[in-house]
Image (cartoon, rainbow, N blue to C red):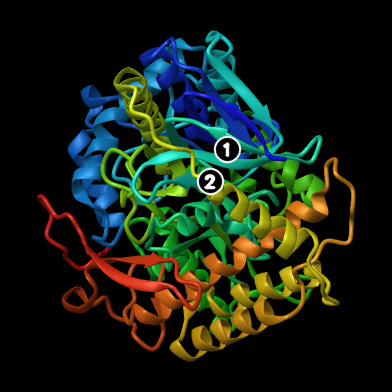
Amino acid sequence: MVETIEYDMLICGSGLAGLRAAISAAKTAPNLKIAIVSKLQVMRSHSVSAEGGTAAVLFEDEGDTIESHVYDTVKGSDFLADQDVAERLCVEMPREVRQLDHWGMPWSRRKDGRIDQRNFGGYSFPRATYASDKVGFFEMQTLYDTCQKFDNIEYLNEWFATSIIHDGRKFMGITAIELGTGTFYSIRARSLVIATGGAGRLYSFSTYALSSTPDGLDMGLRAGMALKDMEFVQFHPTGIMPSGILITEGARGEGGYLLNNKGERFMKRYAASKMELAPRDIVSRSIMTEIDKGRGFKHETGVDCMKLDLRHIGDEKIKEKLGGIREISIKFSGVDPAKDLLDVRPVCHYMMGGLHTNIDGATEIQGVWAAGEAACNSVHGSNRLGANSTSECIVWGKITGEQAALYAQNQIESAVYTPWPHHLVVAEEKRIYDRIFRGSGTVNPYETRQKLTDTMNEKAYVYRTGTGLAEGLREVRRLRSEYWKHVDDRAAEYNTNFTNVMELDSMFRVAEIVLIGAINRKESRGAHARTDYPKRDDEGFLHHTLAYYDPREPIMKKYPVTITKYKPVERRY
């Protein structure tokens, strides 16, 4: 027997986008019953790991402009960003920084009391608003505290959402497992915001939390929504060795140097005007080029890397502005950055792609919106600038929360009855229980997952080739065909074995789309660098990629880029 509960509005995901959506919805429609559904405890969402900053134009009186932020974002995107969306981000964000300030966000301050900002890659003005190097944690705490003011927000912590229920056109609810009891629920609702984050755990060398798997993306995909631009994966230049934990771009914003084995600040060869503060795709490619030319270092694990030098910044400034990464460096590498060089290497850090939405975050199913990294409204195009991701979460959290609340309110008032499609709930119950929980097989799913993520690391990394991507796709499909879809743990309560195998099921579908999109895009643009097609090709590929679910293989389509003011030009720094 499937248990059924009912809310007016659901938010899947409890990171920055999800919490901002909840506040926006609760303020817009105080009478709505709103539930935040999260497979984690709220403050365990991966947003707490954001370190360096949140981009916004705060000081036009000192020379910064909204126009400059828009152009930096569009240029950084290698001209694949939808320019109307980029403009919306830049216009909305200053207000949001001040709103967070009013809610108690402890922004770092200048001596004159004004909110401080630091340099970040690809910007023509210091506009990364920061709180030491723990900006995500403090933003999450601020939003979570603010959520407590609203009696109409409820939390379904440690609930694993598995599918979207709709009638082919309109949203009706979701199915989910309450992890604490193992009970399977159908949750009826009138609107939904998907804010489940990125898919970075498709890669084994990754800055993401282990929970950052693409179940939310896959849930939308299986419901008929497109995944957009999934071939564009951002590799952050400075993942600390050997764990891959992020060393914030703020380290370079505060003056850190990247050095090769000849002691050179090698970025002068690749982006002389920006040096270490070029956009992330350029810095990551530069590191890999130096390594390929024999100018890298060998980490004790045998992996090639570069050195990050913060010693000249000084112990006092490191403790004040980069205290978090100092702690990470000491704990995970045994290195104090005030005294020694850090071993770093490009690491999977962000997905430019996600669920296809319009400028308001609306998806292709009526009543469903997406926000944050789970969404692709095309604000980042083929390469995101640092500090624009937390901004995106906050801006579209606000927008989608308001839109979804108004829609739900309107549905309640219009009182249109739609029969509940019980057969879809039964079909989902069979999919996850008969084909996964009670599945059979001899292959260890954890070994399969490791092989999958290692394949993505090897075949779809900073530099790609058509041959390598095709090999990667064949290997992913071979791994998927093996008998890994089974759960050995029979417990009902907190069965992480069950959730891990469901996550792996989602990972295969999304990994396939990343690889097919990368094979089809025969050019180099932003974070997608093909050594066999080294040039950007605006004539052939100035378009977004859409992928729709089909049980045999994804259906791939093209979608136009919105260009308003800025014609594509060669990208130089």
Task: Residue 424 in the image: state x and y as whole percent.
Answer: 54, 51
Residue 347, numbered label: none
Q: Do the residues labelled 2 and 1 touch (CB within 8 Å)?
A: yes
- Please indicate whether residue 295 sits to the left or right of residue 362 in the image: right
Q: Name the residue under label 2.
A: 197
Could you tell me which quadrant the N terminus lies in?
A: top right
For disc 2, the neighbor class at 10 Å (few under 14, some 14 to 19, many from 20) is many
- Please indicate whether residue 499 sits to the left or right of residue 545 in the image: right
> Which quadrant holds residue 193?
top left
- The residue located at (25%, 65%) in the rendering is 571
Residue 385 higher or lower than 466, as above or below: above
Residue 47, numbered label: 1
Q: Nearer the viewer, residue 470 or 306?
A: 470
Disc 1 marks which amino acid? Ser
Residue 545 higher or lower than 411, as above or below: below
Task: Residue 396 in the image: state x and y as whole percent.
Answer: 37, 35
Could you tell me which quadrant the C terminus lies in?
A: bottom left
- The residue located at (42%, 65%) in the rendering is 232
Disc 2 marks which amino acid? Gly
- Please indicate whether residue 440 sits to the left or right of residue 287 in the image: right
First in residue order: circle 2 vs circle 1:
1
- Residue 370 can be seen, yes or no: no
> Which mark is in front, 2 or 1?
2
- Secondary structure at badge 2 equals loop
- Residue 66 can be seen, yes or no: yes
Task: Residue 551 in the image: state x and y as whole percent.
Answer: 50, 73
